[in-house]
Structure formats: structure tokens, C-alpha cells
Image: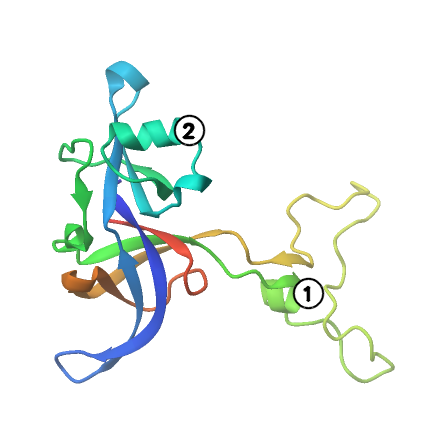
Amino acid sequence: MPGLLGKKIGMTSVFSADGKNLPCTVIEVGPCVVTQVKTVEKDGYAAVQVGFQEAKEKNTSKPMKGHFAKAGTTPKRHLAEFTFEEEHALGDVLTVEFFNDAPYVDVVGTSKGKGFAGVVKRHGFGGVGQSTHGQDDRARKPGSIGACATPSRVFKNLRMAGQMGNERVTTHNLQVIKIIPEHNLLLLKGSVPGCKGSIVTIKK
């Protein structure tokens, strides 16, 4: 699936043509540089590797310096592979104008970490029991977890308390509201996973 790397700037709101106030997320998309072109004959599959954001020379290993030098570009901090329908050569620069003909996109990012959370916050449980009749310590508990005489164990993947967030999340079919090519900005309707400044993947 074709796409590019970008950085989440934050959220704002814009007015549509019919006067509606639309909440949107601002993403800085690219410019991304083609750092490697993989072929079926050499690598076993066809893909294009792109790099995003400048990296310091001192933080780049010698093998990676040679990798970027072959593409004729400076070291990049983030790399990703995409499958493009059109052909690209080493050193090609892809900007936000790549999404000019895309009314909707998918965005992949890492959600905010919430730490240890209970079942009510993590899974939306309604709580167990009443607040009367002597029950004052089980309002937000998960209740029975299903263990009984058979099979005498708790089934895998049972929804319980634990780490919430900090996982790879994909948001599908986000509407492209506006593209600002002079600043490499992409405005998408709605929210995007991740915090401000996080790296996201935008796919057609």
C-alpha cells in the first residue's frame, strides 16, 4: 500500500464550505527521500524504502552512512517501506502532494500510554453489584473471571486490568480536508493516534 511518513503537529479546527466547524489533525508529511528500491529479482519482493527527518552524522553508523550515500542523501532518522504503483528512483523526493488525489487515508501510529488501568477504564466494564447491601469495595471490580471446576483455569485473552495504550493503532478512512504544500501539511478530519511530535504512517 503506498504511503509516506509524517509527524503529528497537533489538532485544530477549520470551517467547511457549508459553514461547519470541523475538528482536524495537522500532520507534517515529508519530504520523504527514496533511500532504497527493492526488486523481486534481488530482494524477493518489490518495495520502496523512504527516509524521513534529518539525523546527525555522529548518531549514524558507518553502514547506514554508506546506505544513505548510495541514495545521494543525508542520513535520515526514520525509515519505512511502501509498495508504490509507479516506479521511483534512488534520491527521489516525495512530498505531501502525493496525497492530492486521495480523498481518504489510513493513519498508523503508537497510542498514548495510560499506564496500569482497571477494567472499567480499559475495557468499558460497567462494574459489578450494587452500592448498598454491604458492598462498598466491588463497584469497579471485574467480577467473576470464569474459573470453575471445568476447566479449572482462566481462558486466554480474558479482558482484565493491565497496561493500557502504548500500542500500534490504525485509524481507517480519515477524510483529507486540506493540503498545504508550501508547508508540507496535511489536515485530516478527526483524531490520529499518538501524542504531539510522534511519527505516524499515512497510507492511501
The amino acid on which the numbered mark 1 sits, given as a three-letter code, is Gly
Mark 1 lies on a secondary structure that is: loop
Position of 68 relative to 126 (above/below): above
- Residue found at x 75% / y 52%: 146
Position of 198 relative to 15 (above/below): above
Q: Which of marks 2 and 1 precedes in the sequence?
A: 2
The x and y percentages for residue 18 are 14, 82
Residue tagged 1: 118
Residue 178 got which mark?
A: none
* Image position of 7 (left or right of 135): left
Label 2 neighbour load within 10 Å: few <14, some 14-19, many 20+: few
Q: Dividing the image into 4 quarters, which one contains the N terminus?
A: top left
Q: Is residue 2 visible?
A: no
* Image position of 11 (left or right of 31): right
Position of 81 relative to 16 (above/below): above
- Residue found at x 64% / y 61%: 115
Disc 1 to disc 2, how far (Cα)? 46 Å
Mark 1 vs mark 2: give the one in front: 2
> Please, which residue is most extreme toward the front here?
58
- Residue found at x 33% / y 48%: 54
Position of 42 relative to 123 (above/below): above
* Image position of 88 (left or right of 201): left
The amino acid on which the numbered mark 2 sits, given as a three-letter code, is Lys
How many labels were placed on the picture? Answer: 2
For the residue pair 138 and 115, the one nearer the viewer reads as 115
Residue tagged 2: 62
Q: Is residue 41 visible?
A: yes
The x and y percentages for residue 109 are 42, 53
